């Protein structure tokens, strides 16, 4: 979500910050899909407007940049390959089939666990994203091992 309003040149500007609840919402759409692929439409990409639209674009682009979402050819890193269309009017999209990578599934499954999500929000808000991915995977591994009585 948009947070931390600053006044610059007598204008109120909003600074985008990572919101783990937004990541969880996006990633849950993938996890709850009956098929392997979804499209941007399934994420309400074409319906949201304003701050909600900005937040969705921001978080999706971060997931793409970090290799957590791919297309059916397992290509990631380039938002255009995953349905984003950049024009002089802003950002649009196409119905390209997209899915989570294995790293994306690991991150999604970690954020799907409320204790892990809450801990990340509380203790890792300012941490580098690579660290957050690593820690979330470690926390999920520990949670599962504890449930199974391993180690």
Image (spheres, helix red, strand yellow):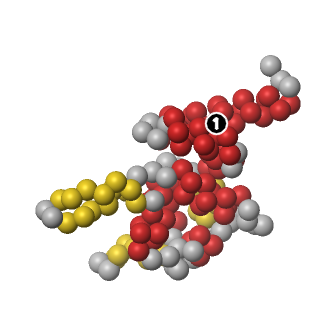
Q: Is residue 57 visible?
A: no
Residue at (20, 66) in percent of width and height: 11
Residue 80: which quarter of the image?
bottom left
**Image quadrant containing the C terminus:** top right
Residue at (45, 51) in percent of width and height: 18
Residue 142: which quarter of the image?
top right
Residue 97 on image: x %, y %: 62, 69
Considering every residue shown, the one lying at the far top of the view is: 151
Q: Does residue 115 appear left or right of residue 86 in this picture?
A: right
Answer few, some or many: residues within 10 Å of disc 1's Cα (few below 14, many 20 plus, some between 14 and 19): many
> Does dot 1 land on a helix, a strand or a loop?
helix
**Image quadrant containing the N terminus:** bottom left
> Residue beneath label 1, please?
137
Residue 78 on image: x %, y %: 45, 59
Nearest to the observer: residue 38 or residue 14:
14
Up the image or down, 75 lies above or below 11; here it is above
Residue at (21, 59) in percent of width and height: 7
Up the image or down, 139 lies above or below 97; here it is above
Considering every residue shown, the one lying at the far right of the view is: 148
Residue at (57, 34) in percent of width and height: 134
Residue 100 on image: x %, y %: 63, 55
Up the image or down, 77 lies above or below 81; here it is above
């Amino acid at each position: 979500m948009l947070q931390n309003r600053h006044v610059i040149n007598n204008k109120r500007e909003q600074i985008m910050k990572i919101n783990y609840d937004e990541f969880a919402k996006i990633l849950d759409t993938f996890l709850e899909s009956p098929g392997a692929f979804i499209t941007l439409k399934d994420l309400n990409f074409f319906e949201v407007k304003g701050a909600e639209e900005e937040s969705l674009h921001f978080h999706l682009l971060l997931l793409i940049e970090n290799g957590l979402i791919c297309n059916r050819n397992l290509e990631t890193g380039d938002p255009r390959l995953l349905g984003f269309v950049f024009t002089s009017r802003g950002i649009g999209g196409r119905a390209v089939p997209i899915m989570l990578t294995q790293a994306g599934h690991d991150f999604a499954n970690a954020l799907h666990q409320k204790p892990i999500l809450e801990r990340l929000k509380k203790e890792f808000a300012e941490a580098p994203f690579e660290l957050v991915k690593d820690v979330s995977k470690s926390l999920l591994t520990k949670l599962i091992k504890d449930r199974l009585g391993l180690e």
